[in-house]
Amino acid sequence: MSGVVRETELRQRRGRGDASGGSAEPMTEGQESDTEGFSEFERDNSVTRAPISMPPKITEERTIDAPAESKYQKMWTRTKMTLFMFSGMFLVFAAGHFYCACLVILLMIGIFSEILQLKRNKDKEMHLPFFFLIRWHFFGVATLFFIRKFLAERIEKLAVSNVVLRVIFVSHHMFIVYCLMMLGIMMFVLSLRKFSYRYQFYQLGWTAVTLLLVCAQCCAQIATIYQGLIWFWIPASLVVCNDSMAYFAGSAVGRTKLIALSPKKTVEGFVGGGILTVVWGIWFCGLLQQYPQLTCPMNDLSVVPFNVQNLNCSAEDLEMFVPDQLVTMPSWMGAWEFTVSRMQIHTFYMSLVAAIVAPFGGFFASGFKRAFKIKDFGDIIPGHGGFTDRLDCHIVMGMFVYVYLQQFVYTNKVASLSNLVNQALQLSAEDQAKIVEMLKSSG
């Protein structure tokens, strides 16, 4: 009888041990109970108490070391990819304007694809004919429109000697874009299915907004590249510098939270990063403005890499990069004087935008990711996430530089002789004869 009672108590103990998170091993034949030799009161107490198992010391050491190894491994992966990306970017920059423009287009494709994936339902789209093709059709139409919009001058010059380009980008551009847009709408209507009306129209709106935010910004950056590589290098370096310096400043003295969307961002890091970004921008501009291959605009769309023969630098363009502007600091800063170029003054304003406005592109992306409950937009770049995660601030900065150039730098630039000749060559023979007669009569 006592054996039956003991076995019942052991079953109860095993059940209570499992409920409290412990693990009770079944008794094997010939194994004695761990309550053997105790009084009834002691056996009852041993039953109610959950067994406490102390893990071996070696297990604790592995548990502590594993996160540290994972952290360092992640840091090493991130560092390797950063060095690889910087090396690739410098190689592309050295290759010239055309290859920088190709890099922007590839990044634009990557960003567009990542954003579309956020709300894509692959199960539904398996039953929708050519729905995947429709998105990329609209992407191509938007790129065709914005490329012509932002690179009109250079495309017109290239189209003089190419009949196909002249028809597509000059004489019938708007009609072709309209026809392609209507073709996309017709394809979309034909793809509608009763079980997914709402999803398909939702995806159409999602695609349209993404095209506006991505294609327009990236095509504006391509136009900026052909104004001179320095207008592309400096803004990109300002964003990278501000992000890095804000991180170091925040890690060193950061105490006050800046914004709820990014809990790790601090006011001290934001201010410290901004000050260091301004200093970096002025110094880096002074270094780059000494090289004509970086400051001169590119007039055509040459595909020859590492070619600087087609650069067109007028005396007026070069004056911008000559240090001839005297700057006097306030008396409380020592009242010391130094000279800077107009380009360095422009860089000062761009540095302020990179430090104050561009980070909100990152905050916007952080809010976007929180809304969709994702950590990164993608995982194509090990240790960094996706293209959108790395380029959110660059998109904001690139559009600003294009607008700044049009409004404050080249506002008084008159049409060049080559541009007027290119436009005249696109006229009919009769109109060209009229222009010749008008020039003779006015002379």
Image (cartoon, rainbow, N blue to C red):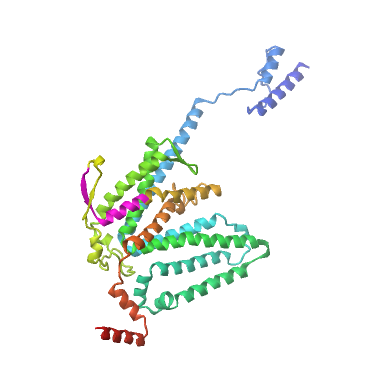
Along the line of sight, which residue is nearer the eye, 388 or 272?
A: 272
Magenta segment range? 335-352
- Residue drawn 42% across and 41% down? 73
**What's the residue at 50%, 28% (across, down)?**
60
Image coordinates of residue 97 in percent, x first then y, are 33, 63
Left/right placement of residue 265 relative to residue 37 reads: left
Nearest to the observer: residue 242 or residue 390: 242
Please, is residue 395 above or below residue 443 in the view?
A: above
Q: Is residue 328 above or below residue 28?
A: below
The quadrant of the image that shows the N terminus is top right
Q: Residue furthest right?
A: 1
Does residue 118 appear in this view?
yes
Kindly tell me whether residue 239 is visible in this rendering.
no
Q: In this rendering, would 344 be left or right of 20?
A: left
Counting the numbered discs, the total is 0
Residue 152 percent location from the top left of the image: 38, 70
- Report the front residue among 47 and 88: 88
Q: Quadrant of residue 311?
A: bottom left
* Image quadrant where one finds the C terminus: bottom left
* Residue 228: quadrant of the picture: bottom left
Q: Nearer the viewer, residue 423 or 38?
A: 423
Q: As displayed, is residue 58 above or below residue 370?
A: above
Residue 46: x %, y % from top left:
67, 18
Q: Which residue is rendered at x = 44% and y = 35% of the image?
A: 68
Q: Is residue 371 magenta?
A: no
Say whether residue 349 is magenta.
Answer: yes
Give the dominant element type of the magenta stretch: helix, strand or loop.
Answer: helix
Q: Quadrant of residue 171?
A: bottom left
Horizontal and vertical percent for residue 170? 41, 76
